Amino acid sequence: MAANETWARADCAEMDQVTPLSKLDPGPHTIAAAGRTDAGVHAWGQVAHCDMARDWDPFRLSEALNHHLKPHPVAITACAAVPPDWHARFSALERGYFYRIVQRRAPLTLSAHQAWRLGWPLDAEAMAQGAAHLLGRHDFTTFRSTMCQADSPLRTLDELAVRRHDGPEGPEIHVTARARSFLHNQVRSMVGSLVEVGRGAWTPSRMARALAARDRAACGPVAPPDGLHFTHVRYDPDPFGSRPAEI
């Protein structure tokens, strides 16, 4: 059974801890998620799966899970029955992330813990030029955590877009990223480096040099987790019959 979920400031391990599956279905249960969400990162479209002993109606299961999840910042938006060989992580064809930056000096109120607040202006056009250097298939060693456990640093980045947006709490910079898979801390590392471009500390072409260095020391500061949102996972066929979230 697969579940489409929203997690607020959750670690992937949190779902194992808070999901009341043992109260609803004989266990033990092993829950596999489509993507990691480190502490402080948000997920709008996380997907997870586990094997169920009972033949649950998907709607009834989602309602039952949400009833028991009320104390926690996790919500099940849909459940679906999937084939035995389907896997939330390995069946995924695309993952998407969205990073939100709010430019203002005053502390954030409504968006507290949901965006990175910066008290200085950023050049979105320069950031977009820098982001273009990272598109395609590359060795992203520079932009992955030293704790990353992936066998290979090679990844194909299908989209890394930077857009300016006039938000209710001030000017915003939105960064969207799409790829089949990402390395540990890859998006936050890329965003942190792009902010260096946006504030004028780096030229856009330095992003290309940092990538070519294949050295973690060439990366800029890692962006904080608050602004990162895991937006969607794409499957074919999609067990939920839904499309990726649009920003």
Image (spheres, grey):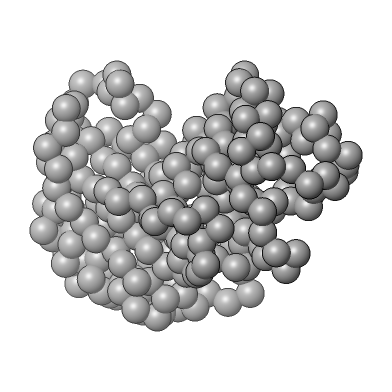
Q: For the point 50% across and 69% down, which residue is it? A: 236
The foreground one among 46 and 120 is 46
Percent across and percent down for residue 137 are 40, 80
Please state if 26 lies on the left or on the right of 245 as rendered.
right
Q: For the point 39% across and 55% down, which residue is it? A: 244
Residue 150's image quarter?
bottom right
Residue 214 seen anywhere in this rendered image of the structure: no
The foreground one among 231 and 1 is 1
Please state if 168 lies on the left or on the right of 24 as rendered.
left
Give the vertical position of 178 relative to 188 (above or below). below
Percent across and percent down for residue 73 are 55, 27
Give the vertical position of 139 relative to 147 (above or below). below
Residue 89 seen anywhere in this rendered image of the structure: yes
Give the vertical position of 75 relative to 195 (above or below). above
The foreground one among 56 and 226 is 56
Q: For the point 12% across and 37% down, which residue is it? A: 166
Percent across and percent down for residue 216 are 46, 65
